[in-house]
Amino acid sequence: MALPLAGIRIADFSWIINGPQIAQWMAVMGAEVIKIESQVYIDIGRTNPAGLPRDAKGYNSNGFYHMLNYGKKAVNLNLATDRGRDLAHALIRKSDFVLECFPTPISEKLGLTYDVIKQVKRDIIMISVSLLGKTGTEPSRWVGWGPLACCFAGLFDAQGYPGGPPRQTGGTWPDYAIASTVVFHALAALRHRNRTGEGQWIDASMGETVIGQMHEYYTEYFMHGRERGKRANADDVMAPHNTYKCRGEDKWIAIAVGNDSEWQSLCRVMGNPEWAHDPKFADQFGRHQHRDEIDAHLRSWTSQHDHMELATKLQEAGVPAGPVLDSVQIHQDPHLWEWGYWWRLNHREVGERIVPGMPVKMSKVPQFNYSPPPDLGQHNREVFGGLLGLSEAEISRLMEEKVIY
Amino acid sequence: MAGLALDDLIVLEFAEMVSGPMCGKMFADMGAEVIKLERPGIGDPSRTLPPFVNDRPHPEQSGFFFYLNTSKKSVTLDPAKPSGAALFRELVKGADMLIENHPPGYLEGIGLGYETLKALNPRLILVSISPFGQSGPYRDWKGTDLIEWAMSLTGYNTPTLVDDENRENPLRAPGHAAETMGAANAAAAAMMALFHRDATGEGQWLDVPCWQAVVNTAKIEMAIWSYVGMPFSRLRKNVSVGLEPLPCRDGYVYVLWAADAHWIALKKLLGNPEVLDSEIFDNLAGRHEHDDVLRPLIRAELAKHDMEYLVSEGQRLGLTIGPVYTVGQAANHSHLKARDAFVEIEHPLAGRITIPHHLVSLTATPPKPDRAPLLGEHNSEIFGKLGLSAAQQQALRAAGVI
């Protein structure tokens, strides 16, 4: 059965995380994603030690790259050469989308701006992803990744313990969070193009994605001129609502109680200790007022338990709770396996590895396109020969001239 | 030709709080007719969440509800009642999509499971958003934004660079990152399903969990385990190099100094101070190994400079550096103003409310958020279209169905 985006082609100039994550959504759903790379600027995902097996050599073994680029084709083009740029334009003329995520000064240098691209193909849908958007004032030219978007958008200032310094969320989640948001809008733009023949430019800012998910912080500021500020895990309504230490190094459980019946169930699992029956904890308001006191009691209880066992026991009693999983546990988690999130990639160079699949399931798409991540330049002959009609001899010559490079 | 890209779609939203309504908002702001089904008399519980106009709780004056429900129509309907279920089925017949975020099995329990809905409308796309998904051992676990976030490696790693693991417990991101990511994944998958339907005529059922959405944001951390074989840790003692907000004279900045080029630029930005001029810091390995010595030196130098100097000049020198702004500083920033990142919208009861404008900007079909609906504001319009007389609507209201 055809995948939902069969017949759609993307000229993908993106690298590292956010652009590749967008292109991966499109690729696994059946679009032909042609990832245009260059040895002049190798995708950091191919080289970063964070995903490189210890004895691995070359550019094709990195888990960081594999997890973000399966499902795609890869070609090489050196956009610093005129011929390289001509071939890029030839690919763009045969594509529905162009995708790029370079900092603005680099996009300009490489000719990857909407002003240039729409002259190459009038109805192209161009997607640019950046730290803070490519229009506006000086920050439109900055370089940065997910955490800097959190910095600019006020998220790190609001992250942390009351009275303490700003703290950061781990990793670079806005680079991933923006991906499906962009995919939604890109497909709306595709539908618009199919109806009207009109292309457009999608100028996506990670900063604005972060602002959208913390909207109440902004609405409160605009209404009242107030900062909601650092609240650790405190919720506006729920209590207890926090993470609590469990047995073992850096092991934790999250518990979120939203009503009286969940509270009573929590008390039952705790063995109905005397403190929990203090009338001041009897309703939601009282629990919220005295949440620090409850937290102290809960911590001394949870610290004697295993986080996995306790979370299971609480959930069986109807209490919202979850173990904070470490990297070993999450790769073994029975739910993620049974639901179908993880899959096993069998790769020529690194053998069998556990890799993440799509975070959605679709009843009419029983199998996404999980073709293996491409080697650097793996599809040069297929794309330049097949799609653009270049002869074998010419492709070889362009390789020697470091155009296909 | 500016227009709305999705103005031919009719979307039912039987969803509450954040994940489902956020997904519905994405469709509504792009032009779809989104009909939100709310509990008779009460409405979406997010109507009780702050901030409120004048700090007075009122179901029509919640800024929280307002943002998540822009551009929608509201009808009150209880599909758990038989006559409510009948109206629900009529609405489903005319809809392209149904977005719901009730516990898995709830719709089936009230006789409105996917097979029933599909029989009524084979073209329907049912978008089910849930904490953990529609199958698997945690299917019936209760989830909240905190739990979905905390159970992921991103959640474990927040805050990162922890000195005292007994005191620095894992924190949720401010806002509702898990639920919002689930919403965006649902919206993207729903568009895929729409292309599938346009090609084949058939609808389908989408299973979109919020936990998996957050799990999916830690691919580097996954690779560190599954490709390199190293367990991932947030404790400073286990992290050879890490980033954190560092104080400057008038606030905090965030700066990356891994590569040699960055290191040279950082030294230049700080005026090439002598204390940093040591050959043990001259390469990446040395900077990693001596991080405990280097970091306090960098802290001391950064503290001598202002944020705007460090960021503007640092970016000019090619450094990956940014300001740690408060929400107020960001809200008033000329860059975000120039991008129309915020929009003021008039509401008949709440007055003028300013909210974040768009998630991404589009040139031809930009999102156009309009005000959120009053509870049941569109009852007579929508139920009138189904052919119910005024008398029938009054009787249904008296029975608590609408």
Image: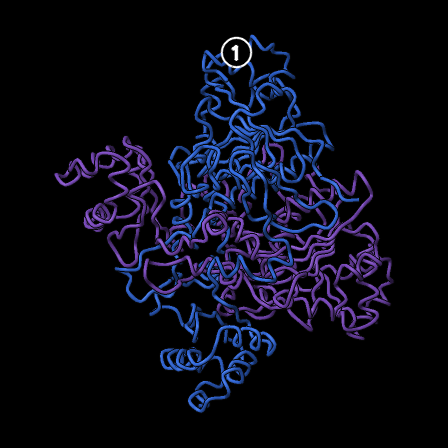
Can the viewer see residue A1? no
Residue B89, x across and y down, in percent? 57, 17
Figure check: B363 above or below B92: below
Q: How many marks?
A: 1
* Left or right of A226 in this view: A347: right
Q: Which color mode does the image show?
A: by chain
Q: Colour of chain B?
A: blue
Q: In the rendered image, which quarter contains the C terminus of chain A?
A: bottom right
Q: Amino acid at mark 1?
A: Gln
Residue A45, x across and y down, in percent? 58, 64
Label 1: element kind:
helix
Residue closest to the far left = A274
The residue under the point 48% across, 12% down is: B82
Name the foreground residue: B34 vs A19. Answer: B34
Residue B109, x across and y down, in percent? 45, 20
Q: Which residue was labeled with disc 1?
A: B394
Q: Quadrant of residue A195?
A: top right
Residue B335, x across and y down, in percent? 61, 62
Figure check: A94 above or below B26: below
Figure check: B185 above or below B378: below
Q: Colour of chain A?
A: purple
The residue under the point 24% across, 37% down is: A266
Structural crowding at the residue carrying mark 1, measured as other residues with C-alpha within 10 Å and reported as few (<14), some (14–19) or many (≥20): few
Can the viewer see residue B283? yes
Name the foreground residue: A57 vs A82. Answer: A82
Q: In the rendered image, which quarter contains the N terminus of chain A?
A: top right
